[in-house]
Image (spheres, coloured by chain):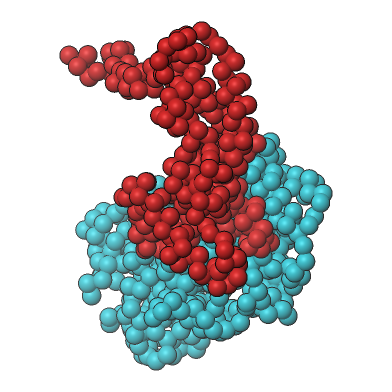
Chain colours: A red, B cyan
Amino acid sequence: MMSKSGISNPRTPYLLLLPGIAFLFTFFIWPIANLAQTSTQTPIAGGDTGEYEQTLRWANYLDAFLENKEQFGRSFLYAAIATVAALAIAYPLAYAIAFKAGKYKNVLLVLVVAPFFTSFLLRTIAWKQILGEQGVVVPFLRDLHIIAPSTTLTSSAFAVVAGMTYNFLPFMTLPLYASIDRIDPRTLEASGDLYANGITTFRKVTLPLSMPGVVAGTLLTFIPAAGDYVNAAILGSPQTKMIGNVIESRFFKIVDYPTAAALSFTLMAAILVLVSVYIRKAGTEELV
Amino acid sequence: MSGISSARGDLRIDHVSKSYGDFTAVNDLSLTIPEGSFFALLGPSGCGKTTTLRMVAGLEEPTKGTISLGNTDITFTKPYQRPINTVFQNYALFPHLTIFENIAFGLRRRGIKDVKEQVEKALDLVELSHLSSRKPTQLSGGQQQRIALARAIVNRPALLLLDEPLGALDLKLRRQMQIELKWIQKEVGLTFVHVTHDQEEAMTMADTIAVMNEGEIEQLGSPADLYDNPKTAFVANFLGQSNLIKGTITGNDGDNHVVELFGQKISLAKNRSHAVDNSILAGIRPEKFRISRLATPTSGNILSGGKIEDVSYIGVSTQYQVLMPWGQELMVFEQNDDGVAPFNVGEDVNISWEAGFTFALRGDEDAEAGTEVNPEEIIEDDE
C-alpha cells in the first residue's frame, strides 16, 4: 500500500528525467558530436563537392580561424556594443517599470515582450525601412546636420548594431526588471537616511543589488548577438559580415562543412571563455 | 561629505499637516521633543504616527507647517542632509553588504576613513561583535533588529527614529529588547523618537508619550500621567482598560465634586476632572476596584447592587465582570494576594475604590472610543 505513494520508489526521479535526457541527446549531444566529427574531415580526393572523409585534420581549426579572424573580431565587437547599448536602454526602463509604473507595471511588461509576437525576420526587415532613405530617421538626422547628405544608414555597421540592440532588448530588460523589482524600496530609503544622495544610493545600493539581473541580461544579449547572422545579413554589407554569416555561407552555399563546423566550435569556445571570465569578474556568486 | 546639517537640540513640529488628496493623515500637529528624551508616538493603525515620523526623517514633505531641530528649519531638507537616522520597521538592512559594512555605511558616506573603531563599538553595544562578517540574511530577526539599531546609532544622530522597531519580534524577545533599547538610549544619550501601536511598549520605554488618533494628538504626558489621569475616552481605553460610567456632578465638597452615578453618590477630585459641564463620564481602572460581599463594610467610593457575571482566574489576578443595577458590566481585576477564595458567579457584591483614583471625562464622549483597536492587526504598516 505504501509504495503507491511513489516516494518510496528510488527510480522515479530518473524516470522523470528520461524524456528530457532523450530530447537533449537527440537534438543536442548527437548533433554536436556529429559536428565535432565533421570539423576534422577533408575532401575526398577526386570526390564530388560536399563529399568529405574523416582524416582528423586538426589544422582545419587554425585555417578556419586565420581565414576569418576579422569576422570573429567584428562579431565580438558588434555584440559588445549592442550589449552595452541594450543595457543603457534597458536599465532605466526596467527601473521605471519596477519602481515608478504603479498599476501600469503589467501593461508595460507586456509591451516589452510584445515584439516577440512578430517574427524575428520581419522585425529586422522592418528596420531596413526605418533606417532607409524613405524612413524618418535619415531625413531627420540630415536636417539636423548630424549626418552628411550623402551618408546612408542601411548596409552599415550602425544598422547592424542597432538591429541587434533592438532585437535583444527584451532579453536584457526582463532579467533586469526581475532583479530590480526584488529590491526592497525601503533599503533605498535607508540609504538616503544614512547620508547617501541619489547618485551614491544608485552606486552603492541599487546597482549592486541589481547585479544578478545585469549579468543575466548581458549574457542573454551577448551570447546570441555574437553568433547572430540575421541582422548582418539584412541590415549589413559585405564589410559588416559577422562570423555567423561566414558559418551560414560555408554550410549552405559553399558546402564546406569541415570549416563551418570548425568555426562553430571556435565560436562556442570563445564565447565560453569570455563568459566565464566575465562571470568571475562580475563576482556574482549569487547569480540566480 | 559636506551638506549634512549639524543642527542639534529639541525637535519642534509646528502646525504640521499632511494630506494625500482628500485624506488628511496628519492634522495641524504641534509637538516639541526635548533633546535627550525617549519619546513615543502611540496610536492605532492609520493615526498618522508613521507619517509624522517619515516627515521628520525627510521621507515625506509636510503639506503645511514647519519642522525644526534646535534653531534650524529642516522642513524641506533632504533626508541625507539631516542629522537624523531611522531604524526601519523591517530593518531595511543592505542584503549585499556584510554586517560590518552595513554599520559602516553612514560613516563612509560622511567621508570618515577609519571606521573600524566606531563600527566595533556599535557592534559591542548591541553585543553582536562576532557576526561582523556575516550577511544580513544569515541573521535572526532579533539580531537584524540590533544591527539596524547599531547602523543608526553609530552615526550619533541628533535624533534617532524608531518605526515599530519591535513589531516583527516574538513577545519574549520584544520584552527583552524593550529593556535593552531603554538601556542603550540612556547609555548613548541620544534623543529617541519611537513610533508604536503597542501601549505596553510605549509605557515601558518612553519618558513621554504622545497618544495620536486620526492625525491629531489626543494627549501628551508621562506614562503614569496618561494612565492615571487620561483626558479623553480614547486615551482611557487605548492605554490599558477603563470602566467609564455616565454620571452628573450634583454638588461640591471642598476640593471634590459630588457625583451621582445612576442614583449612587461618589466623590471625585476636582483636579482630575476634564469635564466641561455637569455631565461626565466617571472613569475607574479595573485594578483600582475592590469587590466585597454585601455584609462586608467598605470605605471610600461605593457602588452597591452588583452581581458577579463572570470570573476568569489568570494566576496573578482574577478578572471579574460585575453587572450593575443600571445594566452596565464593570470590569474588576483583583490581585490574588489575600488568600481569600474568589467570588462565585451570581454572588451579590458591592464595588468600592479609593476616591482619589476616580477621573472624569466629558459626558458627551463616546465611552467606547479606542476600545475596538486590535493591535495584533497592525503588524504591517501604519498607512
Relative depth, front residue between A174 and B100 = A174
Relative depth, front residue between B23 and B140 = B23
Q: Residue at left 55%, top 68%?
A: A141
Q: Is residue A142 above or below residue A160?
A: below
- Residue A124 placement, left or right of A95: left
Q: Position of residue A42 (x, y in %)?
A: 50, 13
Q: Is residue B80 above or below residue B98?
A: below
* Quarter-of-image position of residue B263: bottom left
Return the residue found at the far right: B114
Looking at the image, how many numbered discs can be counted on the residues? 0
Q: Position of residue B237 (x, y in %)?
A: 40, 69
Relative depth, front residue between B310 and B382 = B382
Return the residue found at the far front: A46
Q: Residue at left 56%, top 18%?
A: A60
Relative depth, front residue between A131 and B244 = A131
Q: Is residue A21 above or below residue B369?
A: above
- Please indicate, yes or no, whether residue B22 appears anywhere in the rendered image: yes
Q: Residue at left 58%, top 36%?
A: A71
Please identify the quadrant where the N terminus of chain A is shown.
top left
Q: Position of residue A166 (x, y in %)?
A: 46, 52
- Please indicate, yes or no, whether residue B235 appears anywhere in the rendered image: no
Q: Position of residue A102 (x, y in %)?
A: 41, 63
